[in-house]
Image (tube, rainbow, N blue to C red):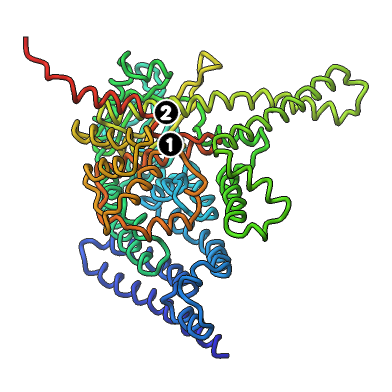
Amino acid sequence: MLRAAGLLSRRGYVAAGATAVGAVTTYAAAHSESAPGLERQAQFWRRLLPISADYWWNVSAYSPKVKLRLFSEGITQDDYYQSDERKQLKNELHERNAPKIYDVMVSLGGLYIKLGQVLSVTVLPIPEVYREYFRRLQSDVPGSECFEGVVKPTIEKELGIESLEEVFDHVEPTPVGAASIGQCHRARLKDSKEDVIVKVQYSEAYWQVPADISAVGDFLKLCVWFEIVDDVSSKASYDEFSRQFLAELDYEQEKRNLQTVYESSIDPSAPYIKRNVVVPRIHEALCSNRVLVMSYLPGPKMEQEVRRQLAYLGIDTKKGVRELVKNGEKDRSVMALSPESASPRSVPSSLVYRFISVDTLFALARWTRAASQWSQGALAKAVLVVPRAVPAGWVGWAAKKEVDILRSRQLDCTSEAVDAILDVHGHQIFSLGLFNADPHPGNIILCPSEDRHKPKIGLIDYGQCKRLEPREQVDIAKLLLSIANDEPDADIARNFRRLGIKTTNDSTEFLAEFGRLMFGSLQPRHLDHGWHRRLHDLDRVTYFPKELSLVYRTALLLRGLAMSLQTNVSIGEAWRSHAEEALRRECRPPETPS
């Protein structure tokens, strides 16, 4: 009875708090010029406060409920945090609240869509149920504006025309993609008959974005206080992320970014042509503060194609490879912590994982599936040779299996595409000094290629670009190369400090491990939340250099893409040649005028 009363009391406090937030903010909105932004923040807090309170009340060591239990049962905080019961409870909370968080992101749109896209591919320890919901935000996000009532008038006003027919043969009313602050429509130019993309900014974006940034910043602080998220991971890139998202409102800047990258892409000395990578060409005369027109790149988005091809191979695309690595690490933990409790079946696998690298495991998994596909393919061919000698159902299976195997062979081309994308982004960061900091799979197109053995990749959406000064390029290159060369902890830490990172204890071991996590190959321990906790107990970041945060984010997104193809890449190795070129440029004497 007391427990039920306490539960009702807790829910009552949460409901009252959410109602009070809504009432106060609604009143302020009605008497303020910033009414739309305040009203939007009220919607956010009314829905998020009960969720954060749910986590805090049930799993935080500072909640009265948990404190009472620890006191009555004589459990220490450390034992409580490591208990299986708490882990199970957190999983239940994730299952209960992930759909609610997803609904909030979709209904509010804007910054929340972008945040979900980033979280869907990060290698940081995001609960898998959240990751699966966030993946839906990559491309399956509906446009939020009516074409006839909003989009069409906006294009006509921004381009200074009476009717769309003056410039376009047609503009498709259904958007081909919906971004966080705008949506894209396919169209055809009237004069040249060229297919183009028309990107239109949402009318409410100018006030929504600042309101969203403020709300998310306050919410992250609340989550840290409630121990829902770790302060290091939440603070590391928030400031730079918010600055970049505000910059995304500037379509004039995006136009200049795209023009710079396009000119680089047609330079024979850059890797684009060699790697068969293309970017859209901007139509400068048809651009404004809220409308961009660029060439259309045909083909499926990379995320869709990778999922389709992995499905042909029989791979569970919901869990991907993350579980494979985690399970291997769990087996190793059984042997390391309690050898006598390990089952006979787990002992051999534990010994294997102790001596075989993640790369070998991935290669073995790919070889096993290839062997399976080959054997099934041979059987399918045999069935089709003598169709009348086998049951009719076998013939249908064999025909479908041949098609599936033929399509699955394209997966090697998709892996080659990842290498090309890594190469191009290394060039952008260390040579061009301007890079796209948002290379999630929804921004990568697999275009039709003349050579079926060599994929053609299209890179789109240049709203979130970052510029680096030559000094910044060199300092980042030194850090990356010290990790790629597997240099001692002291050397990695020194290069990290040169960039200006600040930590509580200035721990050399912490900085070296953090650097390897950023730019080295992924290890099983990196997917273990306990490893991250031990690292965070060793030291804490108090300032993360802004010039490095979006380079790190880009590395995370690209590594997440590679991991979806069971490829364990080292960002340091992938970008080594470009980083070395940045150091060579530093050593060259300045050119003297002739």
| Residue 586 in sight in this render | yes
Q: Is residue 381 left or right of residue 408?
A: right
Asked where in the image residue 295 lies, by quadrant, the reply is top left
Judge by depth and name the residue closer to the eye, 74 or 208.
74
Q: Position of residue 151 (x, y in %)?
A: 36, 40
Q: Earlier in the sequence, mark 1 or mark 2?
A: 2
Tag 2: amino acid: Ile
Image-based side of 238 in relation to 123, left or right: left
Image: 305 above or below 585: below
SS state under label 2: helix
The residue at 36%/54% (across/down) is 233
Q: Quadrant of the N terminus?
A: bottom right
Q: Is residue 404 above or below residue 493?
A: above
Q: Whole-percent x and y of residue 542? A: 26, 56
Contact? badges 1 and 2 (CB < 8 Å): yes
Q: What amino acid does circle 1 point to?
A: Leu
Foreground pick, 251 / 589: 589
The single residue placed furthest to the right in the displayed view is 389
Which residue is disc 2 drawn over? 421
- Please give the name of the residue rendered at 34% of the width and 51% of the height, measured from the top-left corner: 510
Q: What crowding class fits label 2: few (fewer than 14 Cα within 10 Å), some (14-19), or many (20 or more)?
A: many
User: Where is mark 1, residue-wise?
Assistant: 558
* Picture coordinates of residue 553, whole percent (x, y): 36, 43
- Where residue 493 sits, quadrant-wise, is top left
Q: Is residue 496 above or below residue 195?
A: below
Instruction: Please tell me which residue is depicted at 31% across the width and 23% down the height of the picture.
Output: 262
